[in-house]
Image (tube, grey):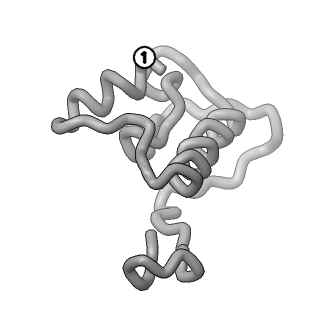
């Protein structure tokens, strides 16, 4: 998020409400995050995941910073989720 519109030097990373501390190699079972930014694995109710899913989220952030666009543009929340799952 930009603190000041159009001022890219005011970039702020936000929303760390679900931050957890875990041991390396541990698995998570509870899915959380923002549609369009989370790894596709998190949409599965049966899949456990680990910290490597964070790399996907960082990739989405970098993509948006570099292009100015979101990789999963859609008109509805359901469509964003579908595109995110299919990637």
Around disc 1, counting alpha carbons within 10 Å, would you say few (fewer than 14), some (14 to 19), or many (20 or more)?
Answer: few
In the rendered image, the vertical position of residue 27 relative to residue 69, given as above or below: above
In the rendered image, the vertical position of residue 22 relative to residue 8, given as above or below: above
Residue 82: image quadrant is top left
Residue 28: image quadrant is top right
Image spot of residue 18 (x, y percent): 50, 55
- Residue nearer the viewer, 57 or 67: 67
In the rendered image, the vertical position of residue 68 relative to residue 63, given as above or below: below
Please give the count of numbered marks on the rendered protein.
1
Image spot of residue 54 (x, y percent): 64, 42
- In the image, what residue occupies the spot 32% across and 38% down? 73
Image quadrant occupied by the N terminus:
bottom left
Image spot of residue 20 (x, y percent): 62, 54
- In the image, what residue occupies the spot 41% across and 21% down? 85
Residue 36: image quadrant is top left
Left or right placement of residue 24 versus residue 9 in this view: right
The answer to whether residue 45 is seen in the rendering is no
**Residue at the left extreme of this rendering:** 76
Q: Mark 1 points at which residue?
A: 86
Left or right placement of residue 68 versus residue 61 in this view: left
Image spot of residue 56 (x, y percent): 61, 36
- In the image, what residue occupies the spot 48% across and 81% down? 7
Q: In terms of secondary structure, where does tag 1 sit?
A: helix
- Residue nearer the viewer, 77 or 22: 77
- Residue nearer the viewer, 12 or 62: 62
The answer to whether residue 65 is seen in the rendering is yes
């Amino acid at each position: 998020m930009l603190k000041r519109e159009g001022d890219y030097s005011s970039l702020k990373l936000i929303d760390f409400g679900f931050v957890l501390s875990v041991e390396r190699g541990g698995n998570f079972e509870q899915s959380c995050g923002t549609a369009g930014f989370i790894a596709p694995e998190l949409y599965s109710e049966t899949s456990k995941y680990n910290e490597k899913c964070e790399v996907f989220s960082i990739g989405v952030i970098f993509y948006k910073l570099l292009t100015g666009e979101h990789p999963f543009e859609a008109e509805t929340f359901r469509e964003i989720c579908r595109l995110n799952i299919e990637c």
